[in-house]
């Protein structure tokens, strides 16, 4: 192509003449990659005229074109419409390519020597013995002062131009919160049971728990004074009586919360260098729960000082956070209130009054609680947490060596006032516990790095020393016991990193080893190697068609956090029917005498970029955990034990399409992720097979060798060798003795979808996910069935002469007809109550599939004062749509808000949907 340009130069005059005749125009320009590299010998094609040209080695091309012609390149995948002002005459293009230079006067030393007279300047700087320091400022127009270093050397200092800048932003948000799905309950049958073949309403004073009474439409109020209902007792309805009322005992409501944050930064600049910066953040957030008068308030203050003096970069940070709440769920208070709201019969109103005339609790039974009574409290806040954190970071570089020193200290003070007042079910005399936890966390981190080489081939050596000193003390007033924990640990990490950069090739390699030393560990670890690599081949087929291969191997040693409480594990000491006795006050005895949790993890993956828009990546991972630690109760003490080895493995794939255009001004990006995993128990320490991880004594998630970690263990129906139900002598399926694994909470896969649409200054984001497979045990449904409060028990209790499919114990096909609820029999012999409080756990295993729209947000920017200030407005909704396969709450909710609790639903709290608005002003 360069040869063509040279041939064109001699014919400039001829072309000028021809232009007057046919006005031939041309387009010129450089063609670059996304990384601003010249695309040499690129074929540029004019779709209108059919001509094409090749770019030269600098990416430059000239091609004949008319206004609004379309040029394409890269095999037609990229296009450009030429506007009228972009095409010019060839003469103009070539002239612009040739540098212009003015004619200068001819200078001759011989001529000057004849006409000029030599002058001597005895004060000339060339004659002086004094000279400038090499460290002098080079730009004389900005010289501030001249300083003499010694007899012959002077130093020029620059003119200091200091600028003070103040900026920041203020963000405020408002959110409206309401609950998602809860189990369906029946609103037809009242508190009571059958007596002598008749369905009888039995009032709260009888302490009746069942809702197997008569149809409420057949009852009315007698109008006489009655402490449990201002309308009177219920009697069979006759003309003239007020019809019985269906009470709604929903404890959820739509709530409003807010969040305000102010960030301010003040800094001083000298030229382009920032010398000192002071910033602070203050904020307050009120998180209003969906329960009656339950909320928490968080106040924050954060400040940071950054400065640079004499080559030292200093960062000082101080954070203060205070969080206080009316109540927490530490003792299962919220689950307890939610459970009682669902179980309250429709013939009883919790809202009428929380107290009887004698000052005790007013509830539909002494074996139940009124949620309003549980939430009534004298003190405004029963939870407070104050956290103070201070950190110092100092960085200094000497050539290729860099030293980073970080020191931080954190102090936490956490207080819980947990209380049940007298007449609470399970605590007739009441119960109160003040739990105080103080944490002191100190960390020292020293990191030294040395770098060799340049951008193309760089080697980095680093040595990192980390010291952690943690102290925690926990006091429970109910048992008057204080627990003291302390751990000092050290990490010594050596690391070597190599990076190679080339035009079409890129690679990185990392190799290291670390030591872990701790005063609470039985054995320190001195061999913890780690390595990872990646290799990237660029432009393998066409421009920006890249492939990247990567892999890693890591060994780690760790210990459980001493600030974590395991008190909630006390649920495993109780049967589900004894939930009312749950009041955790027992902490782990100590964190000493344990082996480290050793982890070996390796990953391998690849990423492929297909052009400028499409990328596909995938990864397989395998994480082997040895001597993992779990809590157990032994000799009435809560202890930690090294119990199990388990392997967590799976793979993940991602597909991304960036900058997909829909129309002229709509730009979109889409990402799809696919995730699949399993966590299999490989080994159990003898004596701990089928240990409960979480749950109750009669239904729990377990450690079982060869099974997934957290498989659900529960009761089941007896079956024959062919898997068919065995029917008992009464015509109902027979409950087997003992327990077995009945459910696997692990999903088959999880897919997540992210979509972004941009139109001018509007941006729309949509995030949703699909979880396929997995199971959960719906204990909420089981208890609602048992007491006759479930929707299904209300619809099916009048079914008669039903024959269950199965076989008798003697092998004959079952032919015994049954009534689901026979008034002539004891209420506990009906279809739902005959198996006990939890029924048969196997019967309540349900699918945990769901499709959820996690978030939809619409935001827009409004520039102010030519963009120096900016206003951003965002509207969003979270959890706006949730489809679930199970009959209950969100399957992602945890049992009593505990770790490892997913897969057990025992009155799990529902998730909530949020509608909100965020306004952010940058100034």
Image (spheres, rainbow, N blue to C red):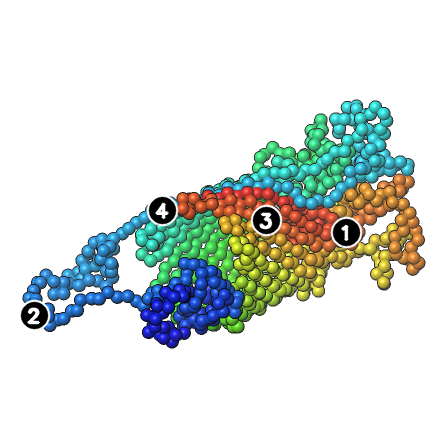
Q: Between disc 1 and disc 2, whose residue precedes?
A: 2
- Other residues around mark 4 within 10 Å, as few (<14) / some (14–19) / many (≥20): few
Which label lies toward us, 4 or 2?
2
Q: Name the residue under label 3.
A: 856
Quadrant of the rendered structure where residue 10 is?
Answer: bottom left
Residue 754 horizontal/vertical position (percent): 59, 55
Name the quarter where the N terminus is drawn: bottom left
Q: Residue 165 carries which label?
A: 4
Q: For marks 2 and 3, give the CA distance.
A: 87 Å
Task: Find numbered disc 4 in the image and state the secondary structure of the residue it sits on.
Answer: strand
Dots 4, 2 in contact, CB < 8 A: no
Would you say 727 lies left or right of 519 here? Answer: right
Which label lies toward us, 4 or 3?
3
Tell which of 655 and 647 is nearer to you.
655
Which label lies toward us, 1 or 2?
2
Q: For marks 1 and 3, give the CA distance.
A: 34 Å
Would you say 148 lies left or right of 740 here? Answer: left
Tell which of 676 and 8 is nearer to you.
8
Q: Name the residue under label 1.
A: 844
Residue 339 horizontal/vertical position (percent): 71, 42
- Other residues around mark 1 within 10 Å, as few (<14) / some (14–19) / many (≥20): many
Tell which of 693 and 859 is nearer to you.
859
Q: For marks 4 and 2, give the CA distance.
A: 60 Å
């Amino acid at each position: 192509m360069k040869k063509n340009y040279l041939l064109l130069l001699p014919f400039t005059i001829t072309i000028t003449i021809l232009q007057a005749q046919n006005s031939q125009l041309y387009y010129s320009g450089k063609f670059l990659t996304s990384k601003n590299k010249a695309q040499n010998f690129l074929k540029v094609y004019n779709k209108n005229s059919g001509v094409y040209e090749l770019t030269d080695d600098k990416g430059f091309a000239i091609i004949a074109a008319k206004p609004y012609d379309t040029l394409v390149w890269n095999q037609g995948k990229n296009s450009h419409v030429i506007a009228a002002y972009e095409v010019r005459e060839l003469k103009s293009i070539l002239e612009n390519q040739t540098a212009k230079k003015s004619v200068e006067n001819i200078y001759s030393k011989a001529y000057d020597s004849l006409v000029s007279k030599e002058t001597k300047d005895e004060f000339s700087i060339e004659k002086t013995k004094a000279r400038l320091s090499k460290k002098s400022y080079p730009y004389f127009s900005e010289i501030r002062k001249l300083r003499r270093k010694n007899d012959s050397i002077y130093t020029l200092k620059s003119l200091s131009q200091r600028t003070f800048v103040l900026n920041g932003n203020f963000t405020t948000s408002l959110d409206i919160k309401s609950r998602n799905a809860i189990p369906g309950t029946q609103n037809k049958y009242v508190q009571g049971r059958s007596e002598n073949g008749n369905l009888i309403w039995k009032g709260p004073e009888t302490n009746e728990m069942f809702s197997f009474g008569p149809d409420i439409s057949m009852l009315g109020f007698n109008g006489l004074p009655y402490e449990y209902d201002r309308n009177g007792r219920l009697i069979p309805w006759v003309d003239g009586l007020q019809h019985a009322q269906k009470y709604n005992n929903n404890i959820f409501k739509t709530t409003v919360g807010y969040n305000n944050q102010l960030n301010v930064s003040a800094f001083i600049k000298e030229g382009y260098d920032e010398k000192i910066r002071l910033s602070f953040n203050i904020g307050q957030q009120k998180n209003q729960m969906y329960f009656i008068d339950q909320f928490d308030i968080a106040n924050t203050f954060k400040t940071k000082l950054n400065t640079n003096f004499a080559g030292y970069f200093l960062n000082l940070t101080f954070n203060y956070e205070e969080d206080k709440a009316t109540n927490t769920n530490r003792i299962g208070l919220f689950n307890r209130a939610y459970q009682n709201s669902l179980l309250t019969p429709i013939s009883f109103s919790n809202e009428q009054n929380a107290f009887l005339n004698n000052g005790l609790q007013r509830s539909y039974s002494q074996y139940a609680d009124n949620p309003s009574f549980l939430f009534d409290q004298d003190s405004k806040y029963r939870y407070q947490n104050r956290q103070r954190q201070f950190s110092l970071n100092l960085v200094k570089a000497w050539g290729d060596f860099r030293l980073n020193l970080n020191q931080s200290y954190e102090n936490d003070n956490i207080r819980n006032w947990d209380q049940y007042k007298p007449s609470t079910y399970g605590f007739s005399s009441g119960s109160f516990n003040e739990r105080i936890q103080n944490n002191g966390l100190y960390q020292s981190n020293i990191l030294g790095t040395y770098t060799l080489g340049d951008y193309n081939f760089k080697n980095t050596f680093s040595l990192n020393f980390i010291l952690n000193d943690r102290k925690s003390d926990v006091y429970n007033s109910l048992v008057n016991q204080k627990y003291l924990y302390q751990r000092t640990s050290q990490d010594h990490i050596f690391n070597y990193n190599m990076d190679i950069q080339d035009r079409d090739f890129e690679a990185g390699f990392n190799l290291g080893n670390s030591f872990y030393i701790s005063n609470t560990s039985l054995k320190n670890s001195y061999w913890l190697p780690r390595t990872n690599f990646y290799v990237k081949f660029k432009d393998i087929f066409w421009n920006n068609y890249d492939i990247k291969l990567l892999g890693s191997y890591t060994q780690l040693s760790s210990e459980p956090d001493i600030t974590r409480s395991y008190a909630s594990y006390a649920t495993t000491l109780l049967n589900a029917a004894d939930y009312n006795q749950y009041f955790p006050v027992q902490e782990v005895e100590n964190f000493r005498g344990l082996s480290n949790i050793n982890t070996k993890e390796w990953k391998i993956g690849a990423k492929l970029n297909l052009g400028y828009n499409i990328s596909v990546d995938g990864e397989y991972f395998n994480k082997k955990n040895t001597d993992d630690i779990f809590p157990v109760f032994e000799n009435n003490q809560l202890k930690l034990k090294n119990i199990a080895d388990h392997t967590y493995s799976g793979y993940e794939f991602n597909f991304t399409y960036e900058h997909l255009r829909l129309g002229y001004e709509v730009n979109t990006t889409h990402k799809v992720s696919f995730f699949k995993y399993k966590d299999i128990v490989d080994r159990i320490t003898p004596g701990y097979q089928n240990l409960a991880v979480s749950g109750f004594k009669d239904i729990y998630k377990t450690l079982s060798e060869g099974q997934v970690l957290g498989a659900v263990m529960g009761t089941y129906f007896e079956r024959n060798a062919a898997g068919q139900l065995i029917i008992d002598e009464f015509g109902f399926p027979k409950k087997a003795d003992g327990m077995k694994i009945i459910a696997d909470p692990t999903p088959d896969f999880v897919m997540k979808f992210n979509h972004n649409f941009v139109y001018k200054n509007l941006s729309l984001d949509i995030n949703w996910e699909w979880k396929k497979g997995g199971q959960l045990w719906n204990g909420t449904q089981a208890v609602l069935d048992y007491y006759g409060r479930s929707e299904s028990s209300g619809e099916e209790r009048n079914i008669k002469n039903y024959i269950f499919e199965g076989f008798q114990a003697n092998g004959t096909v079952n032919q015994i007809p049954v009534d689901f609820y026979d008034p002539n029999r004891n209420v506990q012999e009906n279809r739902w109550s005959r198996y006990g409080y939890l029924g048969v756990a196997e019967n309540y295993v349900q699918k945990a599939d769901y499709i959820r729209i996690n978030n939809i947000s619409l935001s827009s920017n409004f520039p102010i004062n030519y963009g120096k200030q900016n206003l951003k407005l965002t509207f969003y909704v979270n959890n706006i749509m949730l489809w679930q396969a199970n009959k209950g709450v969100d399957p992602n909710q945890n049992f009593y808000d505990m770790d490892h609790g997913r897969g057990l639903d025992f009155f799990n709290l529902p998730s909530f949907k949020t509608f909100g608005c965020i306004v952010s002003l940058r100034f």
